[in-house]
Amino acid sequence: MDNNDIPKGSTVIIPKGTEIRSYSPSESHRVAGRSYRVKVDHTLGATLINVGTRFYKDGVPVRESLHLGRRDAVEVANTIGGTDADTLRAHAVEYDKSPVAASGPDYRHLYVEVAPATVRWAGKGGYWNWVPVTAVKLAD
């Protein structure tokens, strides 16, 4: 399920055993002891870090430029287990080129997902709670 598939106000089911994160000072995370039905306030897309660019000629990759800032390297390493070129290539997701460069070189940006898309709702005490989008099911 994609975060675009869940409009504001939808009711979703959080299955038993799902880890629920929260801004609550008393419960920053907990495991759902039962299934919950919650009303979605909003969704947030995945957090992506740009790790490079792949260049194409006639639809075939011809060159790759991998780059990673020092600050981002720690987060990427903690998420995928390393920052060497082979690890980055294995985990990188390719996105279409920018429309601005449509007449220039053909390229795709490479990103690594460091946090999944989430579904958020107001919980106990008004603190935001969230789970990954992939953990929920739309209620009928």
Image: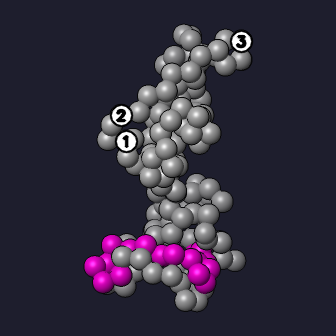
Disc 2 and disc 3 in contact, CB within 8 angstroms: no
**Between marks 1 and 3, how big is the CA–CA gap?**
32 Å
Relative horizontal placement of residue 1, taking residue 79 as reference (left or right): right
Q: Amino acid at mark 2?
A: Gly
113 inside magenta stretch: no
Which residue appears at 62% of the width and 80% of the height?
15
Disc 1 and disc 2 in contact, CB within 8 angstroms: yes
- Which residue, given by chain and number where applicable, does mark 2 sit on? 69
- Give residue 45's position: percent from left, percent from top: 49, 52
Sequence-first disc among 2 and 3: 3
**View extreme (bottom): residue:** 34
Q: Is residue 12 above or below residue 133?
A: below
- In front here: 8 or 101? 101
Q: Is residue 44 above or below residue 104?
A: below
**Between marks 2 and 3, how big is the CA–CA gap?**
30 Å
- Which residue, given by chain and number where applicable, does mark 3 sit on? 58
Residues drawn in magenta: 11-27
> Of discs 2 and 3, which sits in the foreground?
2
**Which secondary structure lies at badge 3?**
loop
- Which residue, given by chain and number where applicable, does mark 1 sit on? 72
Q: Is residue 90 above or below residue 34?
A: above
Residue 82 makes an appearance in the image? yes
Relative horizontal placement of residue 78, taking residue 35 as reference (left or right): left
Report the quarter where the C terminus lies.
bottom right
Which residue appears at 56% of the width and 21% of the height?
64
- Give residue 14's position: percent from left, percent from top: 58, 78
